[in-house]
Amino acid sequence: MKKLWTVILCFSLLLAQVSMTGYTSYAQESVVIPEEDSSGEVDEANEAAQTDTVDPNTEEADTETEEVDPVAEEEAPAAQEATREQTEAAEAAAQEEMMSIEEPEEEASESELKENSWRYSDGELSVQEMYAGSYANAWNKENGRYVNSRGEVIPGAVKKGIDVSEHNGKIDWARVKASDIDFAIIRCGYGQDRVTQDDDWWAYNVSECERLGIPYGVYIYSYADTTAMAAGEADHVLRLLKGHTPSYPIYFDMEENKMLALSKDMLANLAKSFCDKVSAAGYRVGVYSNLNWWTNYLTSPVFDNSSWSRWMAQYNYKCDYKKPYDMWQCTSKGRVNGITGDVDLNFWMTETADVAPIPTDMPDIINYTTHVQSYGWQTAVNNGNQSGTTGLSKRVEAIKIEVGSGYGDLGVEYSSHVQGIGWQAPVTAGELSGTEGLSKRLEAIRIKLTGAEAEKYDIYYRIHSQTYGWLGWAKNGESAGTQGFGKRIEALQIVVKKKGEAAPGSTDGAFKQRLLGYSSHVQTYGWQSTVYDGDMSGTEGRSKRLEGIIISLKSHSNQEHLRYRTHVQTYGWQDWVTGGNMSGTEGRSKRLEAICIELTDEMARDYDIYYRVHAQTFGWLGWAKNGEPAGSEGLSKRLEGIEIVLVEKGGNPPGTVGGAFKK
C-alpha cells in the first residue's frame, strides 16, 4: 500500500508541475513588454494596452502606468526553481520505488512468451520431419484401416484427429466435420491466468466444435518452472472451461526449452500440480510431450498414473515409444479441408497385440486376405505377415489364400469353422472360406499345402482369438483356433518354411475345443449353468437328486449325431432324445437313476463318448461309453452328479472303465 501511495504522489507532483508551467506561460504571454521602435518612441498600441481603463464614474483618470514590484520580480524565478527541484526529486523517488516492485519472471513482458521448443523457434513452427516414406494416401484409411507414410497399417489407430491453435487462423469447422476428422484438441491459451494469454481463437474454436457436435479436448502450452506457476496455468484452463464439457482429456503441454533445466522430480511435480487441480474439478487430464522428453525426462513414476492420458509426439512413420499411450501426434504437415495450410494430425490409439512379420527368404510363396467385420476385405499380405486386427474386437468372417507363382506344382487347401455352421468343406486357390454378408465369425481354420512340391515345405499358422489372444502355431492341416467356445478369430498369421526348419514359435495350445456341453436340473436349485467336456454337473455331498439333463454338441451344428435317454423314478427308461433336448422331468420331484449316451454317424466314426455318474450311497461309479448304462436300476438310488467327455476314436479312456452300472 505504501508503494501505491508513492506512485500516486509522483503523478500528483507531475500534474502540479504541468499546471504551474502552464500558468507561468500564460502570465508571460499576457504581460506585453513595450518595445521601442527605431525612433525610440513607444508603440502607441502597446502603451494603450498597458494603461488602466478609465472608470467613467471617477472624476479623474489615472494616466500613469502600473509599476512592477522589483522584489516579486526577483522572487518568482527562485520559486519556480524550487518547484522544479521538488518535482524532480519526487520523480526520482517514485521511479526508484517502482523499480523495487518485483514481477514474476514469466510476466516481465508478454512479448517474451513465444514458444521455444523442439518444434518451435520464437513462436514459429520450425520442426523438420525426418520420417521415411512419402505414400500418397498417408494418414488416411485404406480398407477400413489407417495407414502411415509408407502405406502400412497403423496398429491400434482407431480415430483420427487434429490439434489447433491461433497459429492455424480461422477454421471452417463445418468443412472439418465433413472430412475424415473424428476429434479436435484445442489450445485454450498459454502460461498464467490472464485474458491476454488466452488463445485468440479459443472461444470461436470451442463454440464451433460444440455447435457442430465435434468431440474435442483441450491443451495449454506451459511455461511453468514452479509448482505455483503450474497451478496458475491450471486456473487459466479452468476459467476458460466454465460452461464447456470436453469429451477428450485436458492436456498439460510440456515442451518449453527452459523446462529442460529442471530436475526430473520437478518436472513430475509440475505435471502433478496441474493435473491434480484440473482433475479435482472433474476433468480427465493428460500430459503432452515428444519421444525424447518421454524417454529421457518425463520418467518419474508420477507419469505412470493410469488415470492420466499420455499424448505422444513423434513425427515418424511409426511411434517408437514402448509404454502405453492414448494418442500419437504423427505429423505437423497434415492437410484437412477447412484449414489453411498445415495442421497437426493425431491418432487416438487402443492397445493392440499386432505382431511383427516373420522373417523369410520366400516372401511371395503365399499371400492371403481376410474379410473383417465393419472393414471388409483387407489388403492382401504375404508370407509371414498378420492379416486381421487385434484390440478392436472385430471378427474375421472369411479368408482367401493363394500360392505365389514360380513354385511349380504347389497349391493350398483350407477350411474354416464358422459360427452356427461348423467346419466347411475345404476350398483352394483364392476361393472364399467362411461367409460374406452373414455376420458370422470364423472360430478355427485348417490349412495345408498340396501338389507335388508340397513335401518340400511346412505351412505354419496361428490365430489371435477373442479372450485368449495369440494361440500356438499349428501346421500342415491341423486345427488352429477354438471350437465350442463361441470365440471369434480376430487375426491370423501364416508362414511357409522349408521342410524341417524350426517352427516360428511355440506349437503348444494351437487349438482349444469344447466338444460338448451339458446342464442338469437339480433338486432345490433348478437348472445349473452349462459345463463342458468332463466337468461335473450337479452336486456332490449335498444329497440333491438330478431330475433332468440337456446335452448338446458344441463342435458340430447337427445335434442329430448325439442322443441319450434316462431312467426316471416311477417311470423307468424314457425314450431317446437328440442333442439340445431335455431327458427326465422338471417340476415332478422325480429322481434320475441311470443314463445312456451315444454318438451316431460321423461323430461316432471320429469319437467315443465316455460318462460317469455320482450315485446315492455308491459315490462315483466307473466310466461307461457309447450307449452303455451308467447308474443303477431297481435300487432307488438317485443320481447326484455327472461327467461327460468326448475322446478321439480309439483314444485312452478318461479313467477306470467298469462298474459303471448297478442293477
Image (spheres, rainbow, N blue to C red):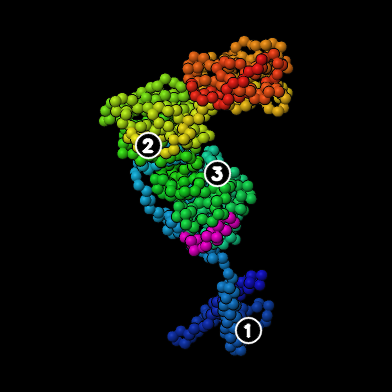
Q: Amino acid at mark 1?
A: Asp
Above or below, comparing residue 632 to residue 10 in the picture: above
Residue visible at 46% across and 46% down in the picture:
328
- Indicate the position of residue 162 as horizontal and vertical percent values: 47, 44
Q: Residues within 10 Å of mark 3 (few under 14, many from 20)?
A: some
Q: Is residue 271 magenta?
A: yes
Gap in Å between the C-alphas at discs 2 and 3?
37 Å
Residue visible at 63% across and 49% down in the picture:
281
Gap in Å between the C-alphas at discs 3 and 1?
94 Å
Q: Main secondary structure of the magenta part?
A: helix
Q: Secondary structure at mark 2?
A: loop
Q: Is residue 188 magenta?
A: no
Q: Which mark is residue 572?
A: none
- 2 or 3: mark nearer the eye: 2
Quarter of the image where the N terminus is located: bottom right
Q: Which residues are magenta?
A: 257-273
Q: Marks 1 and 2: in contact by CB < 8 Å?
A: no
Mark found first going from the N terminus, 3 or 1: 1
Q: Amino acid at mark 2?
A: Gly
The residue beneath circle 3 is: 248
Residue visible at 57% across and 22% down in the picture:
657
Residue 79 appears in the picture as rendered: yes
Q: Which mark is residue 384?
A: 2
The residue beneath circle 1 is: 62
Q: Quadrant of residue 81?
A: bottom right
